[in-house]
Image: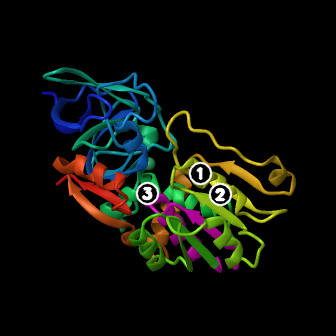
Amino acid sequence: MSRTTEAAVLYQTGQPLRLIELTLPALKPGQLIVEVAYSGVCGSQLLEARGRRGLDRFLPHTMGHEGSGTVVEVGEGVTKVRPGDRVVLSWIRGSGAEVPSTVYTSADGPVNSGAITTFQRLTVTCENRVTPLLERMPLREAALLGCAVPTGCGVILNTLKVEPGSSVAIFGVGGIGLTAVLAADMTGAAKIIAVDLKVHKLEQAQRLGATHLINAAQDDPFQRILEITDGMGVDYSVEAAGNSGAMMTAFRSVRDNSGVCVLAGNVAAGQKICIDPFDLIRGKRIVGTWGGESIPERDFTRYAELFISGKLHLERLITHTYPLRDVNRALDDLEDGKVGRALIEMR
Ligand SMILES: [Zn+2]
């Protein structure tokens, strides 16, 4: 008997996801089935659902790329986990088999899926997208280990290696930006400047450790950052808004000689940024990041331990929880800037 599951499927970009029943295919070697407990909702799914990634050749397809759950069944050759193991589901590749795609069946025909999707109760994924969880790590916060935390913490701890006493400006304080604020606070950064257009998001950043707030709807972030840093600029900046204008400002805002700007946000396909090469000559640097350079086997456990020991307050990031049937409302609320990190709870 093949298994079936409820899933949120994108049939057409710009249209709401449809909740339908899917039949799971037989597992290929290296694949496994996970019963999803929680899925995160991030800007990446919003770009996909709204068609801002350009032409989508995979429609209809399942969605979501971070979550947590329990392994139900493993295919041939899977040794990393066993049925009953609690795992993080992440788009970031870890060790083990890579099986890039899956096709589900439905009453309306086939539905495509990548190596991992999470807006569904049961998911077929592959060995390298799951990481076993520490026993004391709750599934709710564990869902954030799939994308927001590795990217937000990884940018601060791995990409930038922020030192105590330094200054950091974070542009866009949604899920990834807020996690970066938490991580910067944990490292002992002296100035943590949150930049956003929404007052309630700035207030949330303040509760998570931001020392200075800049409302970019009212003030010029570049000028304010110079005032806050005695005209020097910040040691580090992180762009997590996915806005090309913010990316340019984030780069200008770092100090000469040693300042580093990291781009962590996703912009819509085709958007470009423009920078002054003289800023590069003066020693400002700009880099991108792929999941905060986090390595699942090494870092997911490290971030979970920081949470369990009370140093990294991941519970504060979760502002909204929705049942699966409200997945479209979750995407709308994310688009309206209402949420920090939103979770879909499957039960
Ligand atoms: Zn994501």
Q: Distance between the residues labelled 2 and 3?
A: 29 Å
* Label 1 vs 3, first from the N-terminus: 3
Is residue 189 inside the magenta stretch?
A: yes
Instruction: Say which residue appears at 61% left-offset and 63% top-offset.
Output: 156
Which amino acid does the dot numbered 2 rest on?
Thr
The stretch in magenta equals 165-190
Q: In this view, does 22 lie above or below 213?
A: above
Residue count near mark 3 (Cα–Cα under 10 Å), binned few <14, some 14–19, many ≥20: many
Residue count near mark 1 (Cα–Cα under 10 Å), binned few <14, some 14–19, many ≥20: some
Is residue 174 inside the magenta stretch?
A: yes
- Residue that badge 1 annotates: 245
- Residue that badge 2 annotates: 249
Tell whether 93 sits left or right of 8: right
Task: Give the percent coordinates (x, y) of residue 309.
Answer: 46, 77
Q: Is mark 3 on a helix, strand or loop?
A: helix
Q: Is mark 1 on a helix, strand or loop?
A: helix
